[in-house]
Amino acid sequence: MEFIISDRMSKMKGSAIREIFKVAGDPSYISLAGGNPAPELFPNKELAEIASDLLNNNPVLSLQYGVTEGYVPLREKIKEMLIEKENISFEGNDVMITSGGQQGIELITKALVNEGDTVIVEEPSFIGATNAFRSYNAKLVGVPVEKDGISPEKLEKVIAENENVKILYVIPTFQNPSGETMSLEKRKAVLEIAKKNNILVIEDNPYGELTFDGNKIPTIKSMDTGLNVAYSGSFSKVIAPGLRVGYIVAPTELIAKIAVGKQISDVHTSILPQLMVYEFLTKYNLDDYIKENRKLYAHRCSVMIEAMKEYFPEKVTYTVPKGGLFIWCDMHGEYDTKEVAKECMKEKVVFVPGATFMVDMEAKCSAFRLNFSTMTDERIVEGIKILGNALKKIMGE
């Protein structure tokens, strides 16, 4: 049979990162490409005991259909956590469980965006989100990420120049891919601009707990008194990504529409992983577990930065994140990091070229993203040395 692909999907391209994963799964490769949490941090034993107990003692609840909005005790637990840790109000807001954080972004887009509507994103930005927006034929417009987040002035200019702006998508804390964090002043300004222009802010916060020094800036959602912010969270980076348990906090009216969209997509998030996450949060201290995450990632980030200082050409600049999983590097000038990636692939080192994260994914890009979370110290240093040699070769140093 000859398939005629829909207009909606014909322009879509698969995530370059997912394609790289296919290669990086080979243990002989040094992967500086993914966004995976360190597997040695997974609470394997605890989750195995929880799953066994659920299946042996409560098989019907564990294996039967659930409600679309999610397992009620888990939703209540998330509310408690967000009230205590993030000062998020649930007056006029509700929470719904999603199959990973990314699904929440896609469901909001399904509920709000018509073909041709404008969605504003940070540039560079998370490809999972930008592809969700593209899949609904939204017009994507980027605002450059600066050291302390996007510029409110540039944001206002973009809004003025584009019609039907429906969504502003941001990762304010340890942004993917840049690793940068939006200042408190800019968070306040972004919220005020969104309120003034009746634009929904999607605040994606998968890395907020992974602060190396324990310091946190208030979320945009915590300052949202006008119900202008939808907050996306996930347990992928702090418990395990394979469970695919995330959540969205949004105005109650919007949650109702998102729930209808989710019924169409997958009925509900798999109930067994929801129960496992709830039992884990109930029986164990998540903060203790997060401290171990922070310690390991801070160390590996430091190892990578020191190796870059030693092996990278001086002209290459890079961010020095205070948390999260990523470092953003830039060769500057008329370089294309796709060519660097090809050179490194020959030496079995993989990273993600910067064009992957841009509004125009076909344009030449001199920047690239590195991840430090999954490789050992020795592999990080070896990979950075190989990458540094490839950069010097292409830059003529």
Image (spheres, rainbow, N blue to C red):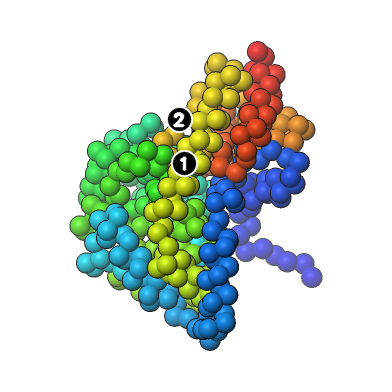
Q: Position of residue 79 (x, y in %)?
A: 31, 66
Up the image or down, 198 lies above or below 156; here it is below
Within-10-Å neighbours for mark 2: few <14, some 14–19, many 20+ = some
Q: Which is closer to the viewer, label 2 or label 1? A: 1
The answer to whether residue 195 is left or right of residue 74 is: left
Residue with the mark numbered 1: 295
* The furthest residue to the bottom: 60
Disc assigned to residue 320: 2
Q: Residues within 10 Å of mark 1 (few under 14, many from 20)?
A: some
Front residue of this view, candidates 58 and 190: 58
Residue 168: image x %, image y %?
A: 37, 50
Please give the name of the residue rendered at 30% of the width and 55% of the height, measured from the top-left corner. Answer: 85
Q: Position of residue 45 (x, y in %)?
A: 57, 63
Q: Is residue 122 above or below residue 203?
A: above
Q: Is residue 248 above or below residue 394?
A: below
Pick the quarter of the image with the C terminus: top right
Q: Amino acid at mark 1?
A: Lys
Q: Residue at x 69, y 38 (%)?
A: 30
Q: Is residue 394 left or right of residue 63?
A: right
Which residue is located at x 41 percent, y 39 percent?
A: 212
Residue 181 appearing in the image: no
Residue 296 shows in the view: yes
**Mark number, residue 372:** none
| SS for dot 2 | loop
Rendered location of residue 268, percent (x, y): 49, 75
Residue name at image x 67 percent, y 48 percent: 21
